[in-house]
Amino acid sequence: MLRWLDAQRIVIATVDMIMNESNQLKKKKRASAAKSEVKQSKVLNIVDSLSHEHVLTEQLLNAMQEQVDNLNKKNDVDYPLLSHMLHYFNDYPDKYHHPREDLLFQRLLKRAPRYIGDIKELEAQHVDLHNDCEYLLVLIKNTKPENTAAIRKLTVHLQDYIDFYRMHMHIEESRVFLAIKKELLDGDWIWVDKMLELGADPLFGEEILASYQDVSEYIDNISLECDLQIEPAGYGWSFIFRSIKVLGSGLRETRRVVRLRSKIGWSGNKLSIKRAFGNSEVDQVSELPQKIFRRSIMHIKEGTADINAIVKSTNQRLVRPSEKLENWREIRRK
Ligand SMILES: [Fe+2]
Ligand SMILES: [Fe+2]
C-alpha cells in the first residue's frame, strides 16, 4: 500500500514538474513574442514614420518644382510661397526628421559597419541640405525678379536642391532603411526610442502654422492635379506616338538645362556636379561625359522600374497633366 502511495506521489510530482517547466517555457515564449512585438512596433513606428515623411516631402518638392518650372518658363512666380517652403525644411526636417535618422544610422553602424560608406555620405548630406537651405533663403531674399542673371542662378540652385533632396531620400529608402529594419536589435530600438526628440510638424501635422497655410493650400491643388495624371492603360500606335512625344520633350528639356548651365560657368556647376556624383572629385571637364553617361543610365533604369511598377500595380498609364487637366476642366464646365 505504502509503495502504491509513494508511486502515486512520484507520478504527481513528475507531472507537476513537467507542467511547471512547460508553463515556464510558455511564459518565456510569450515574453520573447512580446519583445519581438515591441521591436516590430518600434520598427514600424520609427522607420515607417520616416518613410511617411518622405512621401510628404516628395509632395512639397513637387510643389517647389512647379514654381521652379515657372521660373524657367518666365511665368509668374510666388516668391513668398517659395520662401515659406524653404523655411519649412529648416523648421521641421532639419530639426526633427534628420536627427532621428542620424540616431538610427549610429546604431546601424554599430551592428553592421559595412554600411559606413552610405552612412557617412547621408550624414554629410544632412549637413549639406541644411546649409543649402540657409543659402537659398538668403539668395531668394536678395533676388530681384527683374535681374535675369540672378533669376538664372536662383533657378539652377533651387533645381539642384530639389534633385539633391530626392537623391538623398532615394539612398535612404533603397539601401539604408532596409538595413536598419534587418540589423538593429531590440536594445537599439529601445535606445533610439529614449533618445528621440519629437516635434509637431507645422505643415503636415494636425495644426498648420499660419505661415505655412499658403504652402498647404498650394500642395492640395497640386495633389488634385496629380490625381488626374492616370488613365486606363492602352498600348499600340497611340502608345508609340506618345512615347516619341515624351522622348522629344525630354530632349528639349535636356537642351534647355545644358544651355542654362553653360551660362553659369564651370565654377558655378562644380559643386552641384560633385554632389550629383556622390561627392567624388570631378576636377577635369574631360571626366564628365563618362560620369554623366553612367548617371543617365542609372536614372533611365530607375525611371523605367518606377513606371513599370505603376503600370503593373494599377493597370494604368501616365498622361501629360495638362491634357488631363483640360479634360477635367471641360467636364466641370458641362
Ligand atoms: Fe535623411
Ligand atoms: Fe530622410
Image: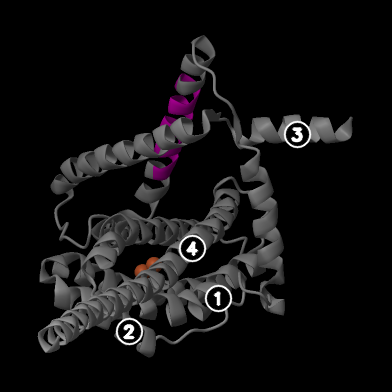
In the image, residue 163 lies in the stretch drawn in magenta:
no
Residue 201: horizontal and vertical position, in percent? 57, 77
Q: Earlier in the sequence, mark 3 or mark 4?
A: 4
Q: Which residue is mark 4?
A: 52
Residue 276 x/y as whole percent? 28, 56
- Do the residues under discs 2 and 3 have CB atoms within 8 angstroms? no
Residue under numbered circle 2: 190
Magenta extent: 244-257
Q: Earlier in the sequence, mark 1 or mark 2?
A: 1
Label 1, label 2: how many angstroms apart (C-alpha)?
32 Å
Q: Secondary structure at mark 1?
A: helix
Residue 2 appears in view = yes
Q: Nearer the viewer, residue 201 or 266?
A: 201
Q: Is residue 146 left or right of residue 277?
A: right
Q: Amino acid at mark 3?
A: Trp
**Residue that lies at the very extreme toward the right in this rendered image:** 334
Which amino acid does the dot numbered 2 rest on? Ile
The residue pinned by badge 3 equals 328
CB atoms of marks 4 and 2 within 8 Å: no
Q: Nearer the viewer, residue 158 or 263?
A: 158
Alpha-carbon span between mark 3 and mark 1: 33 Å
Please give the name of the residue rendered at 52% of the width and 80% of the height, measured from the top-left corner. Answer: 91
> CB of mark 1 within 8 Å of CB of mark 2?
no
Foreground of the two, 243 or 135: 243
* Number of other residues with Cα within 10 Å of mark 4, as a class: few under 14, some 14 to 19, many 20 or more: few
Label 2 vs label 3, nearer the camera: 2
Q: Nearer the viewer, mark 3 or mark 4?
A: 4
Q: Which residue is mark 1?
A: 87
- Mark 4 near ligand 2 (CB under 8 Å)? no
How many angstroms separate mark 4 from mark 2 (CA)?
A: 21 Å
